[in-house]
Amino acid sequence: QGSPKAVSRWYYGFAEYGIASTSARLGDTSLAKTAMLATLQSDYWSTDVIRGDETLRKVTGGAWLDSLMTCFETMRQLSASSWPRQPTLVIVPHCFRQNPDGTNSTKRLIALDSLSSRLKDSLRIHRPVILALHGGNASYREFALHWRAVADSLNVVVLIPPGCLRYSANDNSWDDTYNVCDPYITSTLDRYAEVCGYTPETYIAGFSQGANAGIKYGFVHPDRIKGVIAVAGLMDAPLTPEMVQNSAEAGLRICAMSGEYETEGFLGTIKATEHSCDAGKLPFHLDIVPGMAHEVPADLAPRLEHEWAWLENGN
């Protein structure tokens, strides 16, 4: 189910926006415009980020930038009917990837509705599940690559859904209001239980905007989510003492990891969430990763392996 072309396209678009933004700050109008054109041609559609980049708007011209984005928005809408289907992906641990003849399957990303009968039978031993939510305007297939080692090291199933808002053939995001996210995440978990025949012990993880949605879902559904894993996350709404108390009584735990060089807008809100949880006696671990900015740590699997016993039972 992998799509190397789609993944490389996402990286290219993200990199081109970085070039456009940096070029604007260096006063290079020509390069900023060229890179901005390449950004949109590669389906990088973080419209709030682009439109909010005042330096980029000033250097390229606000009218030029708005006109360019309007043109590509029209093209995007016209092409939407041809975009490929985006199935929820499942990553099973290494021990499940054996063929009947004893050889190992190299297929790592499996569409949920395409799970074989053999895998479904294996999953009915009540394997825990981590539902992992990618970041805003991102490729969920690229995000899935970070979780293959996690499935193996923790011996869990990782479920990777595309974001509920689709921006292009390859990129998705999450609803900022959370109104669409909640039923969408619930339906994904319900579908897993229906397909695999059991209700798993469930953890929810997320990166950046996905972490924001994951944290909220954990507090709204602490009866369903055992633990939250927030990677380079943020929290755009304050927690009420009642919400924290109810979640603490339900046994919710939160493991967060943010980079040493994370922006204050992100890191500040995570620290505020940590403070609210500490005040309400809800277990919260915040790990500041040295040398990391806004990204998924390269050693995600060993970091989670170190935290797993604590997330499972507090040890």
Image (cartoon, helix red, strand yellow):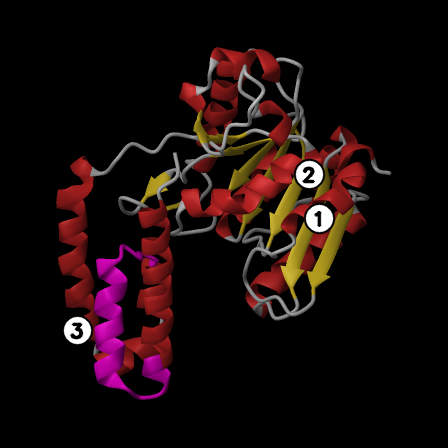
* Residue appearing at x 64%, y 26% in the figure: 95
Q: Quadrant of residue 113?
A: top left
Calculate the distance from the C-alpha at mark 1 to the C-alpha at mark 2.
Answer: 8 Å
Q: Would you identify the image quadrant in which residue 217 lies?
A: top right
Q: Point out residue 218 in the picture as x, y percentages from the top left corner.
A: 62, 36
Q: Which residue is mark 3?
A: 63
Does residue 50 lie above or below 275 as drawn?
A: below
The x, y position of residue 186, in whole percent, is: 50, 26
Asked whether residue 119 is in view, the answer is yes
Q: Left or right of 225: which side holds 197?
A: left
Marks 1/2 in contact by CB < 8 Å: the verdict is yes
Left or right: 76 with respect to 98? left
Q: CA distance from mark 1 to mark 3?
A: 48 Å
Task: Pick whichever of labels 1 and 3 is earlier in the sequence.
Answer: 3
Q: Which mark is residue 191?
A: none
Q: Looking at the image, is mark 1 or mark 3 nearer the viewer?
A: 1
What is the residue that sits farthest to the bottom in this orientation?
27
Residue 110 percent coordinates (x, y): 45, 28
Check disc 3 and report its element: helix, strand or loop. helix
Q: Please rate how many residues cluster around mark 3, counting C-alpha atoms within 10 Å: few if below 14, some from 14 to 19, many from 20.
A: few
Residue type pointed to by label 1: Pro
Residue underneath mark 2: 153
Magenta stretch: dominant SS? Answer: helix
Q: For residue 125, what is the image quadrant?
A: top right
Q: Residues within 10 Å of mark 1 (few under 14, many from 20)?
A: some
Residue marked by disc 1: 302
At label 2, the amino acid type is Ser
Q: What stretch of residues is rendered in magenta?
A: 23-46
The image shows residue 78, relative to residue 221, as above or below, that is below
* Residue in the picture at 55% in, 27% down: 104
| Vertical arrangement, residue 137 with respect to residue 294, above or below | above
